[in-house]
Amino acid sequence: MRIVDAVKQIRQMDPGIGYYKLWLMTKRMFLCDWVPGRDAFLGLLRDFQLMQKRPKPRHTTNSNHRYHKYKNLIRGFVPTRPNELWVSDITYIDLVDDCCYLHLVTDAYSHKIVGWCLSETLEAEHTLEALRMAVSQATADELSVGL
């Protein structure tokens, strides 16, 4: 029970810690006392409902689909100054219960993020919002340089 109490206390401080690190920590905490082996420790966590939920699998881009694929119009193009080429990407951010998506527009020359939008969905509107931010930022920069 001392081990179970220690695990509960550790999980309160760090709910995301995995069972293997927990096992190593308890081995260090209870040097003189008996600590079960790794598999028995895992069984103990299961018995007392101290296991973490399995993460939802995330699916990345699948380019092997039957839908139309557009040509890469910039193959071989190397930008020579800022704002000559922008690229966009979407990445997901894991949250405790779910995830959110970060839509990015990046300047290919400077690698600076020039527009972004954080959203709950993969809808194209959010990427367009990031693009609008990039355009307004570039316009503001041009106006300030011209003054």
Image (tube, grey):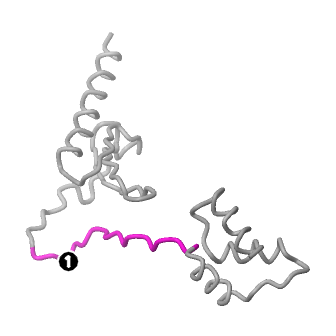
Quadrant hosting residue 26: bottom right
Dot 1 lies on which element? loop
Please state which of residues 125 and 95 is positioned toward the viewer in this rendering.
Answer: 95
Q: Residue at x 25, y 52 (%)?
A: 121
Q: Main secondary structure of the magenta part?
A: loop
Q: Is residue 128 above or below residue 3?
A: above
Give the side of residue 137 with respect to residue 54, left or right. left
Q: Is residue 57 left or right of residue 136?
A: right
Span of residues in magenta:
50-66
Q: Position of residue 139 (x, y in %)?
A: 26, 24
Q: Is residue 69 magenta?
A: no
Residue at left 31%, top 14%?
146
Q: Amino acid at mark 1?
A: Asn
Which residue appears at 61% of the width and 79% of the height? 45
Q: In this picture, is 57 found above or below 41?
A: above
Closer-to-camera residue (48/129): 48
Looking at this rendering, what residue extends furthest in the top direction?
Answer: 147
- Quadrant location of residue 56? bottom left
Quadrant housing the C terminus: top left
Q: Position of residue 137 (x, y in %)?
A: 31, 28
Q: How far across and down, in percent of the image, does residue 125 sit?
A: 17, 44
In the image, 134 versus 120, the foreground residue is 120
Return the residue at label 1. 64
